[in-house]
Image (spheres, rainbow, N blue to C red):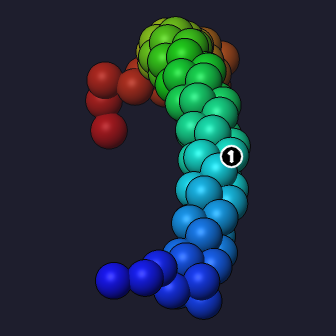
Amino acid sequence: MPEDPIAHSELAALTRRFEEVSAQDSREFGIIKSDLTAVRLQVGNLDQKVENLTGRLDGLERKIDGFIDEQRTVNSTLVELLSTLVGKSTDTQ
């Protein structure tokens, strides 16, 4: 059977198109892979920042609790001092 030059030409054109698309897909995959790596690094950095922030918030919460306890003591002392100044005991009502 003789070779068909048109079929041979079409087959060569299809092969070239396949190779071009394959090369383009490889480049795009490389770009996507690179972007994904960058996103992973950013997520890792954000995760560290969140952990640091959580630690700082825990410390702030302890300080606020201490301040509230101290404020309650000061308020109690002030009530006692003011009650003494006006001559009325806080124990009797």
Q: Which residue is outermost to the front?
A: 1
Number of residue marks: 1
Amino acid identity at mark 1: Arg
User: Which residue does the image show at 54% across and 16% down from the upper left?
Assistant: 48
Decide if residue 27 is in sight here. yes
Front residue (pair 93, 17)? 17
Q: Quadrant of residue 42?
A: top right
User: Which residue does the image show at 30% across and 29% down from the upper left?
Assistant: 92
Q: Quadrant of residue 38?
A: top right
Binning the other alpha carbons within 10 Å of mark 1 as few (below 14), some (14 to 19) or many (20 upward) gives few
Front residue (pair 46, 36)? 36
Decide if residue 25 is in sight here. no
- Split into 4 quadrants, where in the image is the C terminus? top left
Q: Where residue 10 sits: x, y (%)?
A: 59, 83
Rendered view: 87 above or below 11: above
Rendered view: 82 above or below 59: below
Q: Where residue 28 sits: x, y (%)?
A: 66, 52
Rendered view: 9 above or below 32: below
User: Which residue does the image show at 57% across and 38% down from the upper left?
Assistant: 33
Q: Where residue 51 sits: x, y (%)?
A: 49, 18
Front residue (pair 33, 23)? 23
Q: Where residue 32 sits: x, y (%)?
A: 61, 46
The residue under label 1 is 27
Front residue (pair 55, 15)? 15
- Split into 4 quadrants, where in the image is the N terminus? bottom left
Rendered view: 42 above or below 76: below
> Callout 1: helix, strand or loop?
helix
